[in-house]
Amino acid sequence: MIADIAFYVFAAILLISACMVITARNSVHSVLFLILAFINAAALFVLAGAEFLAMVLVIVYVGAVAVLFLFVVMMLDVDFAALREGFQRYAPLGLTIGFILMVEVGLTVIDWSVASGAHFVRLAPMPAHLSNTAALGDLIYTHYMFAFELVALLLLIAMVGAIVLTHTDRRGPRRQNIETQHERRIDETLTMVTIEFGSGAKRISAQSGKEIG
Amino acid sequence: MQGGFFATDFGILILTLLKSLALIVPLLIGVAYLTYAERKILAAVQLRRGPNVVGPFGLWQPFADAIKMLFKETIIPDGANRFLFLIAPIITFGLAIIAWAVIPVNDHWAIASINVGLLYLFAISSLGVYGVIIAGWASNSKFAFLGAMRSAAQMVSYEVSIGLVILSVLVCTGSLNLNQIVLAQRTIWFAIPLLPMLVVFFISGLAETNRAPFDLPEGESEIVAGFFVEYSAMSFALFFLGEYANMILMSGMTTILFLGGWLSPIPFAPFTWVPGPIWFILKVVLCLFVFLWVRATLPRFRYDQLMQLGWKVFLPFSLAWLVITASALEIFGWLPHA
């Protein structure tokens, strides 16, 4: 009974916040509503018994992706009046694209056929003797190891590509090199000299300790 | 507690509420007295007396502070986003409390002993950054915003190495359940084979909780007080207490992951009679003392040094140590099988 109430509460908040993402005037509010939607989706995953997916959703999307997203959106100086200006002009085009996408989704659903073997998979979604996490790990790292590694490699290439594209060799302010700082010894930098009274200090070579000029 | 009222839906709800209260009340008292302990320990390090006027040894000082905070005026700056401004400290404090739902203080003494407890803790600690960012943005102030930006970059960076440390503990236990993780340390605490990871975890924990020497988000010498510069009265108090609650949480995580949780450090008779929660609290207090000791000893890091330490030292090191741990377990055949 409590699980049912929880389901409807989470689902309602999820749907409302998803609508608010696209209707909120302020883009920072949009991102915050998106985060609320993610968290409620994670709660629904928990109710469905997929606790690993729920935690990964929170860690990856809320904890990392949305933080950087929010970071960027907060730094943007968006002029909301200018954003609203073209609304009427672009509305027909937007509506047309939305309608076409909806029709396409509708056609796909009408023509949907379940694969012959899928029925048995759906009968036993979770193995009884394994926990959720272990079951997923077993699938990914034992049965679909090759495909998984391939995906990981693809992501790695994308990451390296992004770094190569944005990396520039900056020659601005001097960099701190902690190793060289630690390797310096007192006798390389400091010389003790006794200066004769009344003669004044003269420039002294750091290596030899002798007067230069 | 077999059957009867506590087996019904409503009964379970009541029981969970009671359990939560039994955890939250000592936790809040702990938070209050941690502020007192910090002032006393810092005073001792600096050869001062610290709070000693209110009550014996100044023991009522936290309550005097709380009453003072309650009666002050909450000032909401002009141009601030009211709702977000007020909800940010609540998020910070709330997250520090809800993480305790999965922490076992004795064998099976957690409010929720879930299969993915470790991931839950990691998820909650990765949410902690939102309180800070929202506060910085909603205050509509340059200093607060700079503090929030610093904090976001810092917390995201150090989370990476915390994740890798958690993974290396995970390959040693083969379970994400915190109860199982503590029980896996019956023969040897992970602090001994994984000592470098303990150090990395603790230092990342300092950065994650915005504590000295990584308290750049509030660096008072450059950006006044950072993200909470505009906060006053109870909303300030919630940020302040949230920081201490997060410190206790980090110490609790260190205790669970590396210091054997509620297990007795000396595994024979007179010491094993001491109840588990006492050992747990003692270990948490030890970690908290190190938190305060570090604050009293080290100067604040410069921002580029902080980033260099996180990305160029901790990340490669913890990655390498994870590979070494996994290889050693595989070679010696010590890999746990779930």
Image: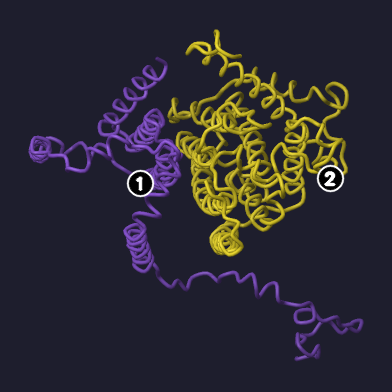
Chain colours: A purple, B yellow
Q: Amino acid at mark 1?
A: Leu
> Residue B186: horizontal and vertical position, in percent?
70, 44
Looking at the picture, do discs 1 and 2 lie on one chain?
A: no
Q: Is residue A178 left or right of residue B114?
A: right
Residue that carries the numbered disc 1 in the rendered image = A76
Q: Secondary structure at mark 1?
A: loop
Residue at (82, 30) in percent of width and height: B51
> Residue B72: horizontal and vertical position, in percent?
63, 20
Q: Classify 10 Å Cα crowding around label 1: few (below 14), some (14-19), many (20 and above).
A: few
Q: Quadrant of residue B266?
A: top right
- Mark 1 vs 2: CB contact within 8 A: no
Structural distance between the alpha carbons of marks 1 and 2: 45 Å
Q: Amino acid at mark 2?
A: Val
Q: Nearer the viewer, residue A74 or A67?
A: A67
Residue at (55, 71) in percent of width and height: A174
Residue that carries the numbered disc 2 in the rendered image = B45
Callout 1: chain: A
Q: Residue lying furthest top in this view? A: B5
**Residue B231 can be seen in this image:** no
Q: Classify 10 Å Cα crowding around label 2: few (below 14), some (14-19), many (20 and above).
A: some
Q: Nearer the viewer, mark 1 or mark 2?
A: 2
Q: Secondary structure at mark 2?
A: helix
Marker disc for residue B19: none
- Residue A212, compared with residue B298, is above or below; it is below
Instruction: Give the quarter of the figure containing the N terminus of chain B.
Output: top right
Callout 2: chain: B
- Residue B282, compared with residue B302, is above or below; it is above
Q: Nearer the viewer, residue A90 or A116?
A: A116
**Residue B56 can be seen in this image:** yes
